[in-house]
Image: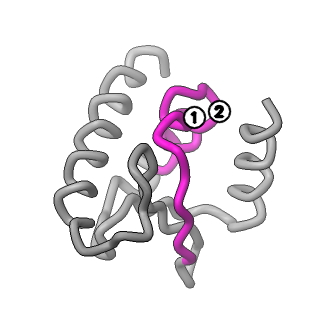
């Protein structure tokens, strides 16, 4: 897993660049944030700080999502296929730290 981590960070940076290009018309995404679509079937859009990409727990979630599903961005943002409750628990912990 430690070997794959640099590729996840690189992919996350590429995703941020792609997202910023696509989101020129999305003024609801403040600078320093990115849109993330979360859910297993229905996707819900969240706007999260880019700083989450530096947190080991968030990177672990990205690694697992990439390994299982790859990164697919049909909605113009990062798509993470996981339970919404699990994502909300993780972001709550990140906000508290």
Callout 2 secondary element: helix
Q: Quadrant of residue 20?
A: bottom left
Q: Is residue 90 magenta?
A: no
Give percent across and percent down for residue 23: 26, 66
For label 1, count other residues whose C-alpha is less than 10 Å away and answer few (under 14), some (14-19) or many (20+). Answer: some
Asked whether the residues under the numbered discs 1 and 2 touch, taking CB atoms below 8 Å apart as contact, a structural biologist would say: yes
Task: Give the residue at the far bottom of this rendering.
Answer: 42
Which residue is the site of mark 1?
Answer: 60
Q: Is residue 48 magenta?
A: yes
Quadrant in the picture for the C terminus: top right
Front in this rendered view, residue 41 or 56? 56
> How many angstroms separate mark 1 from mark 2 (CA)?
5 Å
Task: Give the residue at the far top of this rendering.
Answer: 2
**From which residue to which does the magenta span run?**
44-65
Residue at x 30%, y 65% (from the top left corner):
73
Q: Which mark is residue 57?
A: 2
Residue at x 46%, y 52% (from the top left corner):
68
Front in this rendered view, residue 26 or 57? 26
Is the stretch drawn in magenta largely helix, strand or loop? helix
Residue 92 falls left or right of residue 8: right
Give percent across and percent down for residue 75: 33, 75
Q: Quadrant of residue 55?
A: top right
């Amino acid at each position: 897993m430690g070997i794959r981590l640099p590729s996840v960070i690189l992919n996350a940076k590429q995703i941020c660049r792609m997202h910023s290009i696509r989101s020129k018309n999305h003024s609801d995404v403040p600078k320093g944030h990115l849109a993330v679509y979360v859910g297993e079937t229905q996707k819900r859009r969240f706007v999260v700080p880019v700083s989450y990409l530096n947190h080991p727990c968030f990177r672990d979630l990205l690694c697992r999502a990439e390994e299982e599903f790859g990164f697919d961005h049909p909605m113009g943002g990062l798509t993470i296929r996981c339970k919404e409750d699990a994502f909300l628990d993780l972001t709550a912990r990140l906000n508290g730290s």
